[in-house]
Every structure is written in C-alpha cells, then in structure tokens.
Image (tube, helix red, strand yellow):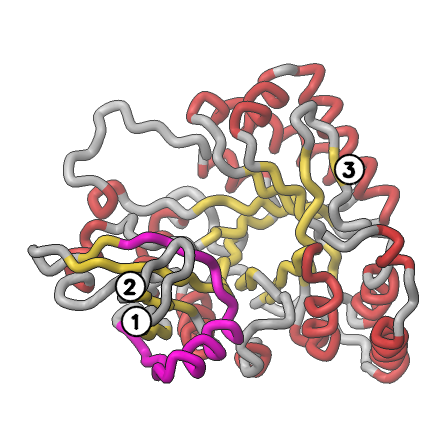
Amino acid sequence: MVAMNHRRKITKRRNFLFLLFITLIIFSPSISHAASFSYAVWIPYWRDDPGTAEVAPNLKAIQEISPFSYEVRADGTLADKLKIGLDPWPGFFAAAAGNKSMILPTVSWIDGDAILRTLASTTARTRHIAEIVDTVRTNNFAGIDIDYENKKAETRAYFSKFLKELSAKLRKDKKILSCSIESRTPVNSRFVVVPKDLKYANDFSAIGQYCDEVRILAYDQNNIDLKLNKQKGRSEPYAPVADIDWVKKVLQEALKSVSAKKIMLGIPTFGYEHAITPRLNGEWDYQKIRSVSYQKAMKLAQSASATPLRNRAGEMSFTYHVISSSTPLTASSTCLVWFPDAVSAQAKIKLAKQFKLRGIAVFKADGESDPTMWQVLK
C-alpha cells in the first residue's frame, strides 16, 4: 500500500492526470445516464493511479464508479483504505461529475465471524449503519455498494435486517444502495447429492427487495460446477474464471428472486495461473498459484513462447512448462493460465442485454485490462 507521504507528493504524472481530468470536465459534453443499460466499474485502492488513468478517458461510457474499497474493522467501524480525500480521487471525482457518472464506493468485509457479531447486535448494527450513512452524506456520494462476503448461514436474517435498515436511511437522502452478492450455482450442478440441510447466507428475496441494484459477482467459478467440469473438463484442462454457460445458470438462479431491472452482471478482467496434474480418469488436479491480469498473462505467454487460444468457456488460456525450479512450482511443472478478455466480456454484455438486466459491473479497472475492453462498453 502506498504510504501517505508518498500520496501527498505531487509528481509529474499526477499533474498530467489532473490536467486530463480538468480537460474532460471542460471539453466533454454532459451526458444523461438514464439509459436502459448501465455500465459500472470498480477501481481498487491499491491501483488507484493506473485505475483512474484507465477509466478517465472512458467516463462517457460509465454510469457508476465504485472505488474499491472501504473496509470494516473487527469492531464494525469503517477503515478508509481508499484515502478518499487524497489524490487521485478528488480530481477524478470532479471529472466523473462532469460526465454525470455516479460515485458508489464499495464497503468490503470478508470476516464472517465479525459480520455475524456486528449485525446480530442491534446496537452494533445501528452504529455500523449510522457510520455508513454519515460517510455517504459527508462525501456527497450518490450511494454506497455493500460487499460482505464469507458470511455464515446464521447471518442470513441479520444481513437482511441490516439491508432493510440501511436502505431506509439511504432512501430518505435519495441515495442508492447497491449490493454486491456472491454468485449461486444451481444445486444440481454443484452437488452430486444435494445436502438436506443446505442453507444460504444470502436471502435473495430480501436482497431483491431492499437493494436498489444487485451486482451478481459472476466470476471465480473455477471447478464449482460439477456438470460443466464433466462436460468440458475431460481430456483437456478446464479452470474457468466465468464460463458463459455457467454465468447463464447463475443469472437464472438470481432471477428467481431478484428483478432483472435491478441486476448488474459482474464481469471479471482478471484470471489465474494454476499448476496442473493429469489424473488417470482424464480429469485434472489444479493448484492455484496466483491471479493474473490480462496484460500480465499476455507477457507471460510471450516469455513462455505460448499462444493464448479461445477455450471451451469462451475465455483465453494457454499452458507452458516450467523449466527451472521456483516456489511453489518445481522444474517440469505444467502450468495453466486462464483469463478473460474483451471478447469474453462482450459475450457477457450481450447475455446481460438478452436477459434485460440493469447492466454490467466490471471488476476491475487497474491499468492492466485488455486495452480493447472499453470499445465493447457500448
């Protein structure tokens, strides 16, 4: 993470970005974002400079921007990991305002125990809601995006109550409540034998009622869909980020409880590198090594003299052999690199429009996406 004194330092690059933002404000025509199909993008705080630089020239195409993210401490109080008052955010927000792009920062929380403890307590939950609302008001945000993951099943009712109470507070101020929700794979695709006591942490019906928009995080599929694994993972590796056939299933599950007019389809710009080992039955074992961006994946392919090809999931992939030992890999390991690109994104945008969804949300703009990604956001 960038140190605060470094953030305060005015560099030539930041001066360039500031001039770019001001140019956008002055010379870009103000546009209406009442379109029937919306585009949103997350910008991570650990890549704020390259992320905002990537998004700035493309603001006309984007209706919602979510700086990622505020985080939540174990006691339920917010931690401003974004350093929202420091560069590059103020100049970038000014440029976004000039194009009528709404700012909906994300509050991210992945500590399941702390989430349950805070939301189950009326006092702690009320205090947590008040701080979120105050943050929205103080910064004049258009709203907030709630991304609480790894919740326990017993959190279900408390999370729904939290959304109901937060929504009521935000709507009084005419602010938007966006909810980023994990994808749900149909049970007959996820289990060989469906557990009798299967419980979910997310009540999709309540989420669809209280959230103004619902961002379905339709990625990190990996090997969760047993039917697709069997259908597409025989004889050749299959470790998708988001197979479009799986995305269809995910949307069909969500649409049982949430109106299409509220759903934003989450689209990834990142992929993964795996060490793979063949099994005797024709399937594969996968050891996830690291995440990769589009640009890192392409550089890795070039260095390995490999050619990325369109795969069975509609994404890009290639394999290469490690020729020298490196942790956690060993010499002679076979690696699989799997990642999305603008073509796979375009297919998912088309799917979202076919389902008549509210729009799509891209995770993430970090300066390393497929450069042609922005040409498909139309």
Instruction: Using the rendered image of the protein, determine whether residue 25 is visible from the camera's viewpoint.
Output: no
Q: Secondary structure at mark 1?
A: strand
Task: Give the spatial CA distance, label 3 vs label 1.
Answer: 58 Å
First in sequence, mark 2 or 1: give its number.
1
In reply to whether residue 346 is colored magenta, the answer given is no
Marks 2 and 1 in Cβ contact (< 8 Å): yes
- Which x, y percent locates residue 264? 52, 57
Q: Mark 1 = which residue?
A: 321
Q: Mark 3 = which residue?
A: 172
Q: Is residue 96 above or below residue 247?
A: below
Amino acid on which disc 2 is placed: Ser
Q: Mark 2 = which residue?
A: 333
- Few, some or many residues within 10 Å of mark 1 (<14, 14–19, 20+): some
Q: Which residues are magenta?
A: 286-311
Q: Is residue 285 above or below residue 335?
A: above
The residue at the point 32 percent across, 52 percent down is 287
Q: Nearer the viewer, residue 343 or 350?
A: 343
Amino acid on which disc 3 is placed: Lys
Q: Is residue 124 above or below residue 134?
A: above
Q: Secondary structure at mark 2?
A: loop
Task: Give the spatial CA distance, label 3 vs label 2.
Answer: 58 Å
